Image (cartoon, grey):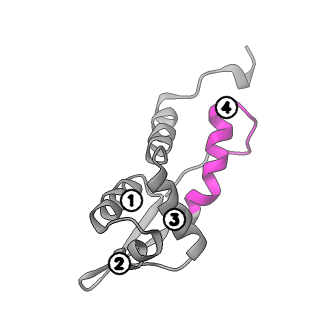
Amino acid sequence: MNENSAPLDRASAEEYASWFKALADATRIQLVSLLARCREPMTVGQIVAASGVGQSTVSHHLKILADVRFVLVERRGTASLYRINEACVHCFPTAADVVMGNPVPAAPTCE
């Protein structure tokens, strides 16, 4: 059995599963795409206006994305600003390679 045929360790598998689960929804994909392309922190109101999705739905999905650290939240007074976690944008394709057994330089972390 070569190095690439060994199973992924459980901790890494659980982390990657949480990422894939968080992205297993079209609305969350839209929100990640919006924030990644915007490159500026946005309020929920701005996200609602840009996405056409209702406020409570946006808030729900942002929480899920923040839980896996794809989205970072910055509190400013009573406002919350959401931005993409650049580390996740860069490490997500590597995570897919790891899961599929493709060679990668190092295991990614989304922090």
Amino acid type, label 2: Gly
Q: Kindly indicate whether the residue at mark 3 contacts the one at mark 2 (C-beta within 8 angstroms).
A: no
Q: Amino acid type of disc 1?
A: Ala
Q: Looking at the picture, tell me which residue is in the foreground, 55 or 93.
A: 55
Q: Quadrant of residue 75?
A: bottom left
User: Mark 2: few, some, or many residues within 10 Å (few <14, many ≥20)?
Assistant: some
Q: Which residue is mark 4?
A: 100
Task: Give the structural element (helix, strand or loop) at label 1.
Answer: helix
**Which image quadrant for residue 8?**
top right
Closer to viewer: mark 2 or mark 3 = 2
Element type at marker 2? Answer: helix
Amino acid type, mark 4:
Met
**Location of the N terminus (image quadrant):** top right
Name which of mark 1 and mark 3 comes first in the sequence.
Answer: 1
* Residue under pointer 2: 45
Mark-to-mark CA distance, 4 and 2: 38 Å
> Mark 4 near mark 2, Cβ–Cβ under 8 Å?
no
Distance CA(mark 1)–CA(mark 4):
25 Å
Relative vertical location of residue 60 with respect to residue 4 in this rendering, above or below:
below
Comes first in the chain, label 2 or label 1: 2
Q: Secondary structure at mark 3?
A: loop
What residue appears at the point 76 percent right and 36 percent down from the top-left corner? 103
Question: Could you tell me which secondary element the residue under label 4 belongs to?
Answer: helix
Number of residues whose C-alpha sits closer than 10 Å to that of mark 3, classed few (under 14), some (14–19) or many (20 or more): many
The reply to whether the magenta stretch includes residue 89 is yes
100 relative to 69 in the view: left or right: right
Q: Are marks 2 and 1 in contact (CB under 8 Å)?
A: no
Question: How much space separates mark 2 and mark 3, taking CA atoms?
Answer: 19 Å
Q: Are marks 3 and 4 in contact (CB under 8 Å)?
A: no
Q: Position of residue 13 (x, y in %)?
A: 51, 33
Label 1 sits on residue: 66
